[in-house]
Image: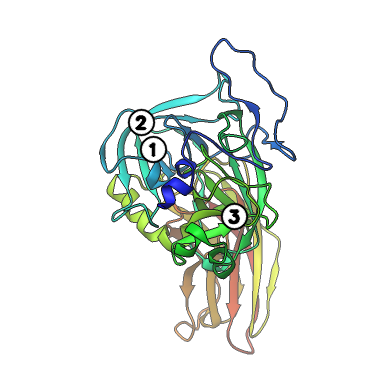
Amino acid sequence: MARTALRILSRLGVVAVTGALLAGGFTAPGQAADPTPTVVGGTRAAQGEFPWMVRLSMGCGGAMYTEQIVLTAAHCVNGTGANTSITATYGVVDLQSTSAVKVNSKYVLQAPGYNGTGKDWALIQLASPITGASLLKLNTDPANDAGTFDIMGWGAASEGGAQQRYLLKAQVPFINDTTCKAAGGSYSGLVAAEEICAGLTQGGVDTCQGDSGGPMTKVVNGVPVQIGIVSWGEGCARAGKPGVYTQVSYFAAAIKTAADSLGGTVPPGGCGKSFTNATDVAIVDNATVTSSVAATGCTGNAAGASTVAVDIKHTYRGDLVIRLLAPDGTSYLLEDITNSDSADNVIKTYTVNLSSEVANGTWKLSVQDVASQDVGKIDSWTITV
């Protein structure tokens, strides 16, 4: 039997998140809302807790990748091409809230080569950008594809159940490929390089129909990153039948290339705020030291032309390697002066493309001294994102 049948509509819009995910039935206009959680262990998400979350009108979830592009699942859309029929709802946990931002689609790009097995991702280009939207960063490091993940959605509370009004959340642990395949049935055909499994052995917590395309996330170095895209599973929250997610780290480069082709790169404007650390940090021989600043109050990603101004006092700057460390740990080499310059001090401003980085978070200036004798200090530094 095809996996689409075993998935019960591939977790697309007819049923939805079970276990600890969704509460409060989605009511039609004119019906009385029931805000009482209907799922054992269900926890309603707070407004703003998952600010990049999107509900799509065909009955799927998604996440804001840029201010004009939503990342969702390939099985949620019907191929690539112009499409104005999808409405994206953003900015609320209550789908009936009058504060919801609603934007129609303009174009859909389904993953090249998608045929129902693996490659389950797609981009929806909106008719106009949602200015200032919170964006969810893609995970690019497979080392992060383990541990405990956050899942969330507006899907049904049980197999065959109704869609939900309120966004709920839960956590599920990673399940390795060998264990996942051993679940049998559809799981024996798991595309290990492209899919990642998560769930409780005993069941009870899972994504389900109506949650397709939504993100599975994890906080890495203080920043949420998207680990997976809700894809499929046999039933919902069944014991021994985990949820299967598109493994974002495998497709991150392809997703970025596709978004760029739509003119969907992260907007270059950034936050425009500056953050400074003026506390001295001693630079000692043959060691690496760091100085941190906490960027707050920003929305979305940093600028494509962010600047890092450094004031480093050192008696032989040819000993130094200078890097910027993003909140997610990504390293940007600002300068490697080693063995090329015997002058004193580094007082300089660097321009760095940080458009793929979330602006808020802890940024670090890293200074490595690779030799002996000469020492110094980080006097101060400022990052403008």
Looking at the rendered structure, the kind of residue marked 2 is: Ser
How far apart, in angstroms, are the residues tagged by discs 2 and 1?
A: 6 Å
Relative to 334, is 382 on the left or the right?
Answer: right
Return the x and y of residue 74 as percentages of the image width and height. Answer: 38, 47
How busy is the neighbourhood of tag 3: few (under 14 within 10 Å), some, or many (20 plus)? many
Return the x and y of residue 1 as percentages of the image width and height. Answer: 41, 53
Vertical arrangement, residue 34 with respect to residue 158, above or below: above
Q: Under tag 3, what secondary structure? A: loop
Judging depth in this view, the residue of 321 and 81 nearest the camera is 81
Q: Residue at x 62, y 35 (%)?
A: 157
Residue with the mark numbered 3: 241
Residue with the mark numbered 1: 68
Q: Residue at x 29, y 56 (%)?
A: 113
Vertical arrangement, residue 234 with respect to residue 297, above or below: below
Judging depth in this view, the residue of 202 and 353 nearest the camera is 202
Task: Give whichever of discs 3 and 1 has the lower sequence position.
Answer: 1
Looking at the rendered structure, the kind of residue marked 1 is: Gln
Task: Give whichever of discs 3 and 2 has the lower sequence position.
Answer: 2
Return the x and y of residue 195 as percentages of the image width and height. Answer: 47, 60
How far apart, in angstroms, are the residues tagged by discs 3 and 1?
A: 35 Å
Q: Under tag 2, what secondary structure? A: loop
How busy is the neighbourhood of tag 2: few (under 14 within 10 Å), some, or many (20 plus)? few
Relative to 261, is 97 on the left or the right?
Answer: right
Looking at the rendered structure, the kind of residue marked 3 is: Lys
